[in-house]
Amino acid sequence: MHILADGSHLLNLGRVDYLIFIVYFAFVLGIGVVIKRFIKTGDDFLLSGRSVPAWIAGLAFISANLGAQEMIGMSASGAQYGILTTHFYWLGAIPAMVFLGIFMIPFYYGSKARSVPEYLKLRFDEKTRGFNAFSFAFMTIMSSGISMYALSALLQILLGWNFNISLVVSALIVLIYTFLGGLTAAIYNEVLQFFLIVLGFLPLALLGLKDIGGWNGLMERLNGLSLANHYQPQTLTTLYRHLGSPHDNPMGVDWFSLVFGLGFVLSFGYWCTDFLVVQRAMAANSMGAARRTPLIAAFPKMLFPFIIILPGMIAAGLSYHAAHAGVADPSAYHLPMKNGQFDYNMTLPTLLGHYFPTGMLGIGLTALMASFMSGMAGNVTAFNSVWTYDIYQAYIRPDQSEQHYLQVGRLATIFGILASICAAYVANQFNNIMDLLQLVFGFVNAPLFATFALGMFWRRSTGHGAFTGLLCGTLAAAAHHGLTLPAGEHIGVKGGWLLMGHAPFHVYDSGMAQSFLTAAWAFSVSFAVTLVVSLLTRRTKTDEELRGLVYALTPKIKEHETHFLTRPAVLGVIILGFTLVLSIIFW
Amino acid sequence: MALDLRFPLGLMFAVLGLIVTAQGLFTPQESLGVNVNLWWGLVLLAFGAVMLLLAIFGKGATQIKTGVVLENPEHSHPPR
């Protein structure tokens, strides 16, 4: 992002807005201060003593994922791709979250593992855990740094605040409450953030709908926009009707890459194996609560498109209408421009400025800042646990006292934040490094679900098989990316870097299609290699050792004691039913 | 642990709701003919009040245990 040298900015704040910021940050820090009194052991600090009630864990689960990249990115996609963006929710996230709660949490929680890498150690072996622990630790620090960078850059553009000061102050706030209150403080603040986002952005969607003339007005304008972009009229307002060929929709994807790449590989890979979210379920106070965590989270996740994606769609419709109306209306909303093109990433902040007066503007911006900070805090708390349980306790100093690990956890927070600040400055110096990192994260994450699925549901899979599978899957992702190219892109961080002057093996219609297929290849290769190598190598874990870690060797959980409607399987069916209804309505 | 999450949650939204409602009352501004601050400030206030009432009178305080030492699943011998 560019830096505005003349100190100009997009939004003007009143004193009341600053008062709102102060109130929010006072509560955030206050929660850290109060919770500190209750943190006595390393496990209190790193895993909330495994005693968080289901509803809190569930809302924190969804909030930890709802970083600002999600808010900004999904509303931007809503403006660019219309309702197709909803596939990230109804096709991607929801089925994976239901699967996690019903089928995978029993092994994560029942194995007593304190982290996702530790599960890999119990199920497979040391090297598989090490690979996952080190790559995850690196990625969380980088993600946290990118959140910090993005927040400071955004505040500079929106409010004209100094980049360095925003960076240091936001890092300091996150540092204070995670240092004091550990995972519990992070989780409590994630719940505050959840309600801030819902209550801060819901009025934006409502005002937008009123402005554009309700649902019918939105449909009409987006149909006009679809036609103007040479698509069929309903392309931006229906989910599945224009997926026959990648040329038929602005995402440039077809139904196969969407269903297999996004819906299956990417979504299950993220939701079911990423410790950032799974940690919230592991901190729940019982097996039932842990299983309900992702299911409780799925209800708001299902409805988020209406407060995140819908404003983006409204923005695109309003902007299209204003540009093609006969008379120029000075009060109409226009999508922001940068270098002669739409700057979709600024959709959400400019909508806030357009509709919210001082007061609600403060609430909306607080919600935005909160989502950046909880993104950082989520990454830092996940990093603390992986560092302390999977690196320090495993390789550096095992068998120390609880007090010792509490100190190590606290020090890891300071180290994590400092490293994130460095990462933020690196991101500020080299714009491309963000793209590059996202790319590497994709390579490492894509094959993970194959490893976990085989590990949990096939007792014959071995440590050697899992490790080689992971490695080959990662390499396959890199190779696929290096040999293909999205249309209109240059060789480099967008792909094609392995071609050495040859023509690309395949040219995709969009970067999104390429990344869906990259994930699909990584998963398939990892799955096949794990399968073959496992059959060729000897099992190192006996059936007794795999009790609680593998489906066939784990006694079924009895759920008769809980109310019918709170049973995970029942909740899961209800969620999938609702999602199906929504998908059919917008088919 | 004694900190029921609904208490800070309710208190924060009550305070924010009061601030925004007051802004809507004393310096009314309209977007699309709606005094957003006034109406949504009342919504925030109502949400905060309900959470506070639940924290004070409701059942099922959000208890979080402290001083917990989990077993290390990787080996059985106890820490020093």
Image (cartoon, coloured by chain):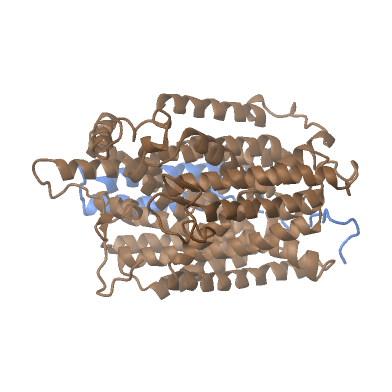
The brown one among the chains is A
Q: Quadrant of residue A396?
A: bottom right
Q: Position of residue A239 (x, y in %)?
A: 41, 31
Q: Does A479 sit above or below residue A549?
A: below
Q: Position of residue A180 (x, y in %)?
A: 61, 66
- Closest to the observer, A26 or A132: A132
Q: Is residue A476 left or right of residue B39?
A: right
- Closest to the observer, A441 or B23: A441
Image point (62%, 64%), residue name = A138
- Closest to the observer, A392 or A265: A265
Q: Does A487 sit above or below residue A585?
A: below
Q: Which quadrant: the C terminus of chain A?
A: top left
Image point (68%, 42%), residue name = A290
Q: Quadrant of residue A22?
A: bottom left
Image point (46%, 28%), residue name = A583
Q: Is residue A124 left or right of residue A173?
A: right
Number of labels in the image equals 0
Q: Position of residue A330 (x, y in %)?
A: 13, 50
Q: Is residue A285 shown to the viewer in this render? A: no
Q: Is residue A495 left or right of residue A522?
A: left
Q: Which quadrant: the N terminus of chain A?
A: bottom left
Judged from this view, the residue extending furthest toward the left is: A327
Q: Position of residue A465 (x, y in %)?
A: 78, 49
Q: Is residue A340 shown to the viewer in this render? A: yes
The blue one among the chains is B
